[in-house]
Image (tube, coloured by chain):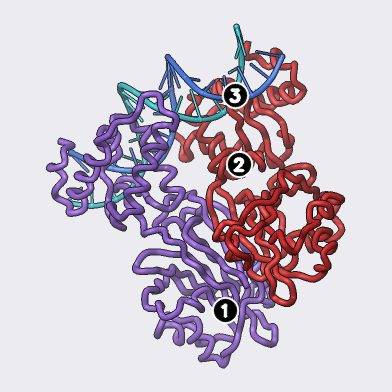
Chain colours: A red, B purple, C blue, D cyan
DNA sequence: CAGTGGTCTAGACCACATG
DNA sequence: ATGTGGTCTAGACCACTGG
């Protein structure tokens, strides 16, 4: 049934079950200072941070964990819920609960692209292009990019990965007219810089960056492997040429506790 | 008992009870697409945003609201919980649930102080000094301010208010040596600028600002009138003189959905 | 003291994803 | 068909706050 041995079909699960037995070995004090669900939260969090639970590993089922801790499932779920909102765990309905990447804080710079100062670790970062298409500009986008409403814009949606794990989600919009060969130039290395360079734009910088907080929409959550409605940090930036012409409008979405944004 | 009339002792409550009756008038579909707690969340949120529930108003008790909606209290609490994490509501144990200020987004600038560009609305903003004292510098603070570990620093804790409601919480540290008369100069208008000016420091600017996400500690929550553990946005900044001397290290804490930080 | 929000239990049914 | 996470109920006791 729900015993540790029965789950040995999955590699991760065998390990996780042993882990669970250890973690739940010491019971909770009946009338403790700290709420039970917070004590469970503490133990799980420590397990994740110490890599006892590896990135990507699946946890045993909620019923099983709750039974192991000898608490109600709702009590356990409070602990899981908080770990999700902090970006440690991610739950998929009908599938299971999984450990996200190690939430080491990652510092980005503001002026040039967010990856301008990673100092040789560039090969740890990859990008996955989710969509690239052209469509008419909405009023808001048109205003920011300085084009007419309804003019053609290029919309690029990507996920940036670090060590293979989603780091942040971004939607970029470019004016269509100045970049007729954007798609072809971008395709080679999935590089916006390349697409700019192919059209003679070699210099550019962030004109303004706005940081806000919010909660992940379902599409963002899916792209980042997050539970929907998880708190996130949003960036909104415009990129301009030295002459002051806007060539990019960028919307970023970062798991809340995953990043430090540095502005000099 | 729990009827609307019985609560008429409080001005807010009478109004809120009438509101509750109206809000709960239409029942929920049994097998709806959207979860019941999310439907309750929607209605409450709309009530707050439309000012039907004024800032500072106390909601009826959770038992009463749950009864009015004809749902279990736990279901209602899921709705309240989300509204708390979004900064709309604030709960105090043993007291009640209260409506926070209108969560209009507030834009701040980065370079000079956060209030440099409020454009004549300055009288809407006030500051409450929570503590002002001198103590030895920790290693971290000493490093940032360029003083020796254990050297005396000035620690200033404040809450910035907008229209009388807490907007953000800040802890500022200054080197003690260069500002012997800080307290006296600050006292007049609760102004750091005054304290600087009294010591001949007229020009200064933010050297670096770091933005991170996190969850409100209990002291921050208390200062901001937030529920503890609510997601927040944190700023960490250093202020330097034109000669590059660090004269301030500042830690800010903002309700997540309450602010836009603009960096030019 | 009475009322508040915070926690916890022992069930139950559901939608979903997978084999 | 099975197991998963998501939702919901009807209770209960607690700690805290205020009059």
Pick the front one: A20 or A87: A87
Q: Is residue A53 left or right of residue B188?
A: right
For image coordinates 58% across by 73% down, the residue present is B110
Q: Is residue B79 above or below residue B88?
A: above
Vertical order, B241 against A138 (above or below): below
Label number found at residue A94: 3
Question: Residue B68 placed where, x, y %?
Answer: 25, 34
Which residue is label 1 attached to?
B112
Residue A100 shown left or right of residue A83 in the figure: right
For image coordinates 36% across by 64% down, the residue present is: B165
Q: Quadrant of the N terminus of chain A?
A: top right
Which residue is depicted at the point 52% across and 62% down? B253
Residue A10 % position (x, y): 74, 20
CB atoms at circles 3 and 1 under 8 Å apart?
Answer: no
Q: Position of residue B96 (x, y in %)?
A: 30, 47
Quadrant in the picture for residue A14: top right
Query: Between marks 3 and 1, how big is the CA–CA gap?
Result: 50 Å
Q: Quadrant of residue A182?
A: bottom right
Number of on-image labels: 3
Residue marked by disc 2: A219
Q: Which mark is residue A81?
A: none
Q: Looking at the picture, how far across and down is residue B10, in whole percent?
A: 17, 52
Residue B139 visible from this viewpoint: no
């Amino acid at each position: 049934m729900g015993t540790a041995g029965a789950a040995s079909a999955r590699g991760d699960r065998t390990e996780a079950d042993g882990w669970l037995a250890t973690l739940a070995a010491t019971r909770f004090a009946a009338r403790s200072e700290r709420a039970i669900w917070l004590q469970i939260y503490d133990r799980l969090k420590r397990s994740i941070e110490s890599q006892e639970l590896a990135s990507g590993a699946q946890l045993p089922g909620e019923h099983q964990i709750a039974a192991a801790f000898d608490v109600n499932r709702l009590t356990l779920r409070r602990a899981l819920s908080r770990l999700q909102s902090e970006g440690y765990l991610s739950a998929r309905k009908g599938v299971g609960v999984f450990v996200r990447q190690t939430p080491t804080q990652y510092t980005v710079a503001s002026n040039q692209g967010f990856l301008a100062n990673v100092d040789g670790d560039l090969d740890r970062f990859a990008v996955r292009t989710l969509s690239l298409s052209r469509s008419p500009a909405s009023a808001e986008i048109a205003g920011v990019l300085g084009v007419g409403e309804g003019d053609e814009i290029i919309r690029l949606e990507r996920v940036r990965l670090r060590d293979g794990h989603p780091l942040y989600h971004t939607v970029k919009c470019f004016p269509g007219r100045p970049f007729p060969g954007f798609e072809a130039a971008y395709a080679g290395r999935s590089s916006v810089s390349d697409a700019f360079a192919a059209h003679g734009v070699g210099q550019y910088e962030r004109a303004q960056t706005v940081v806000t907080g919010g909660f992940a929409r379902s599409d963002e959550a899916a792209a980042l492997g997050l539970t929907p409605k998880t708190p996130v940090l949003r960036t909104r930036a415009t990129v301009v040429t030295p002459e002051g012409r806007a060539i990019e409008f960028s919307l970023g979405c970062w798991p809340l506790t995953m990043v430090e944004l540095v502005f000099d």
